[in-house]
Image (cartoon, rainbow, N blue to C red):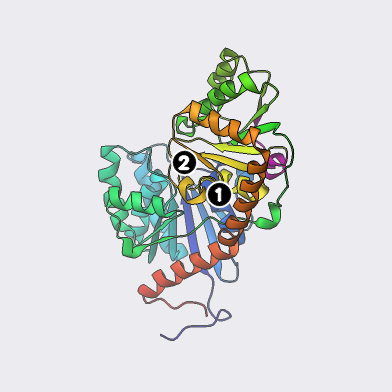
Amino acid sequence: MKTLSAVSQPPIKILFSIDRLVRGGTELQLTGLIDHLDRDRYTPYLLTIRPTDPVLIPENCQHLDLHVPKLFSASGLRSLWFLVRFLREENIQIVQAFFQDSTIFAGLASRIAGTPARIACFRDLAFWNDSRQTRLLRWIYGLMNGYLANADVVLNHFSDIFRIDVNRARVIRNGVDATKLGYQEHTGVTTDIGIVGNMTRAVKRTDLFIRAAGIVHREYPDIRWHILGDGHLRPELEKLTKELGISDRVIFAGRIEDVSGYLARLQVGVICSDSEGLSNALLEYMFRGVASVATEVGGNTELIEHGVTGLSVPPGNPQALADALIRLIEQPELREKLARTARSRVERIYSWDNCLAEHGRVYSSLLQSQKMELPA
């Protein structure tokens, strides 16, 4: 097929759709992808269907701000047809959707509009799923013609539950800017242990982190425990620290603008979710030289090789988590070795160069299958 040069062909228009932007892992990956896209090759648009802080909107990206509190309502239907017209009038060539509500909304609109490339992204283990959503999303995913996941275990899970056509699916690892995540050597005793994650979903199990801290505190009362993030669960978690008698040792840091900078003060980082896709926080620990302890769920198992790049523990078990933390406290040489090996491994695999190249191949493949001409 004859192609047009990048000079003579206008950039490919991509509309990214997500429920809303917050300072979460998926949201940061999406805004990072938009920020890193070559504007000579792609023109990005961002659709949000719930209220979003304008500060979080990427630069040089048109924001389509639709408030759709209920998808299946008269206002939801009007918004759907508005989006259909927008996709046609703007000649959007790719729609890439994140999270279930925005995938239902943008997936249906893009299919009606005849958008050539329609991509659903999977970044967790569908902990939110129920039988009604399974039936609805099987239908919606059937309207898409491309699927992306950030870990093999995530893709396999969605394929099993939602009957995804794996021939149209690909795993693309998270993008990470290693230049902004310099490795810091931590030697000596362990003084600070932390967890990064918003307190908006119980599945993140910040309560488990606190309970493990309470156990460790009995033997090592001088350890400081850091919780980075915020959300509606915070008051009950603060109450738990008081009940366990560790409120003076637990620091609720709130939402941190510079998470990477804050990680410089931690020797050990924890991810203790009951369900996880591929944790950005865990990747940041590994890049920054923070020894990691993570539950054996989802993409954590692809990042953590027990005893090599971190320590793995079963989910929902505060004693097992406490035991792993005590092991690192008592064996600083092991903690340092795990951190060094983790950095070496992740920097070979997780980069924005790799992530962008993989996205470009997916976009080209989908558009070529629709017999569209692409930039050289």
| Residue at the spot of label 2 | 67
Q: Is residue 61 visible?
A: no
Q: Position of residue 370 (x, y in %)?
A: 36, 73
Residue 288 drawn above or below residue 245: below
Q: Is residue 136 above or below residue 3?
A: above
Count of marks, rendered view:
2
Real-space Cα separation, disc 1 to disc 2, in angstroms? 46 Å
Is 282 in front, or is 257?
A: 282
Highlighted range, magenta = 253-264
Is residue 77 within the magenta segment? Answer: no
**Comparing labels 1 and 2, the label whose residue is closer to the camera:** 1
Task: Kindly state the secondary structure of the residue where label 1 is placed.
Answer: loop
Q: Nearer the viewer, residue 310 or 280?
A: 310
From the viewer's perspective, is residue 196 above or below residue 243? below
Residue type, label 2 = His
| Disc assigned to residue 218 | none
Q: Position of residue 30 (x, y in %)?
A: 53, 52
> With 278 as the anchor, is 214 left or right in this view?
right
Is the C-beta separation of discs 1 and 2 under 8 Å? Answer: no
* The N terminus lies in quadrant: bottom left
Percent coordinates x, y for residue 154 in the rendering: 40, 50
Which is more N-terminal, label 2 or label 1? 2
Question: What amino acid type should be assigned to the residue bearing mark 1?
Answer: Val
Q: Residue at x 30, y 37 (%)?
A: 130
Assess whether residue 263 is covered by the magenta stretch: yes
> Circle 1 sits on which residue?
308
Residue 34, by quadrant, is bottom right
Which residue is found at the position 47% from the left and 77% from the top? 374
Q: Residues within 10 Å of mark 2 (few under 14, many from 20)?
A: some
Q: Position of residue 266 (x, y in %)?
A: 69, 37
